[in-house]
Image (tube, rainbow, N blue to C red):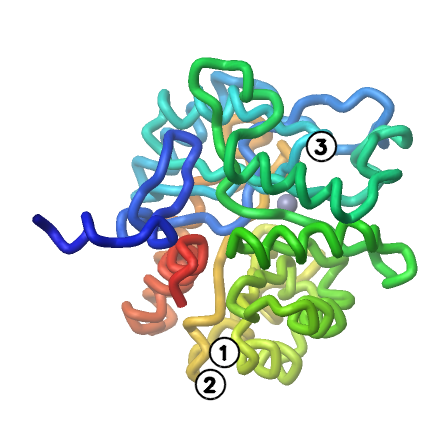
């Protein structure tokens, strides 16, 4: 009998095709989007990614470059379709990990049930998507379970969906699930970190997204020291000047010994960033030119592997 057969279930990661040991995730994009339905009644400027064959081609290119796994960060109600995620994963051979939770309010119709729900009801719903299956897949022969919780902070604390934060905290406490937290350009990360720690979560259940839009190395090191994971994804967003901000930040964090607190991603909700839809860098850039540049910059192999998948994989499995 191999050691793995003794491992408790928390060492497995829930992909749309079922559980996988975290060691098998390989290169993993920690924050991306491979399917977003049009959402009637939501902000008409919201992203849409619904060209199945082109998305499949994009995932094929990702896999050909060595990418094996990708976290899809669109929760239900704002464009997620777990059935499409399952079909894309099967057809491409890329492990996809779906989420439950909630995104920014603007991506939903105003009357969506979430906004009037109490924390307890929200938590029950998130637990059911993690444990039984995503709402839109529950009646199918192969329900798809969520592998993590994704939530969003608005730009001010007063504007945040507090019942949702409370519900996500209760869910993560109960299920030990990882929470990926959208930040508006890094805002409120320190506040949210304390908020969730006060509610009994371990910092290593928290991933703060888009933190490189607020490239304050001192803040990043403080958060890293607490144990949270910081997700960086502005590689192809010229307005954030990645050459002057993101790349030096990666170097500084690695030099400070925090390569185990960084997760890299390309967050291509905007179809223009896709290679086969919008002639952008595409999903393949993470295992492709981003990985090449990390090598060229002399980032040690261990650190590269941590940032390109190792860190997020362990945390998805509840292993720290
Ligand atoms: Zn995103």
Residue 199, given in percent of the width and then of the height, sits at 68, 68
Image disc number at residue 69: none
Dot 1 or dot 3: first in sequence order is 3
Q: In which quarter of the image is residue 19?
A: top left
- 61 displayed left or right of 153: left
Q: Is mark 3 within 8 Å of ligand 1?
A: no
Quadrant in which ligand 1 is drawn? top right
Q: Are marks 1 and 2 in contact (CB under 8 Å)?
A: yes
- 243 displayed left or right of 5: right
Question: According to the image, label 3 marks what residue?
Answer: 47
Image point (36%, 23%), residue name:
90
Q: In this view, does 177 lie above or below 200?
A: above
Residue 225, given in percent of the width and then of the height, sits at 54, 82
Q: Name the outermost residue toward the left.
A: 1
Q: Quadrant of residue 112?
A: top right
Question: According to the image, label 2 marks what residue?
Answer: 256
- 5 displayed left or right of 169: left
């Amino acid at each position: 009998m191999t050691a793995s057969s003794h491992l408790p279930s928390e060492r497995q990661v829930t992909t749309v095709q079922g559980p996988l040991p975290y060691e098998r995730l390989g290169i993993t994009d920690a924050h991306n989007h491979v399917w977003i339905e049009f959402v009637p009644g939501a902000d008409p400027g919201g992203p849409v990614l619904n060209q199945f064959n082109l998305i499949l081609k994009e995932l094929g290119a990702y896999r050909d470059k060595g990418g094996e796994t990708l976290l899809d960060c669109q929760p239900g109600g704002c464009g997620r379709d777990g059935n499409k995620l399952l079909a894309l994963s099967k057809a491409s051979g890329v492990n996809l990990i779906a989420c439950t939770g909630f995104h920014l309010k603007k991506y939903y119709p105003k009357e969506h049930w979430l906004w009037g729900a109490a924390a307890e009801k929200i938590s029950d719903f998130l637990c059911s998507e993690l444990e039984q299956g995503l709402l839109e897949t529950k009646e199918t022969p192969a329900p798809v379970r969520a592998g993590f919780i994704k939530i969003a902070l608005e730009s001010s604390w007063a504007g945040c969906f507090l019942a949702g934060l409370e519900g996500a905290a209760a869910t993560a406490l109960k299920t030990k699930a990882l929470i990926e937290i959208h930040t508006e350009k890094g805002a409120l990360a320190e506040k949210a970190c304390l908020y969730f720690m006060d509610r009994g979560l371990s910092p290593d259940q928290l991933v703060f997204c888009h933190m490189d839009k607020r490239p304050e190395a001192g803040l990043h090191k403080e958060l890293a020291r607490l144990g949270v994971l910081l997700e960086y994804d502005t590689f192809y967003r010229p307005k954030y000047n990645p050459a002057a901000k993101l790349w030096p930040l990666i170097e500084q964090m690695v030099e400070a010994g925090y390569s185990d607190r960084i997760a890299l991603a390309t967050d291509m909700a905007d179809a223009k960033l896709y290679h086969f839809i919008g002639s952008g860098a595409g999903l393949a850039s993470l295992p492709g030119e981003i990985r090449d540049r990390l090598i060229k910059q002399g980032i040690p192999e261990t650190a590269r592997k941590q940032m390109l998948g190792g860190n997020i994989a362990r945390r998805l499995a509840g292993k720290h």
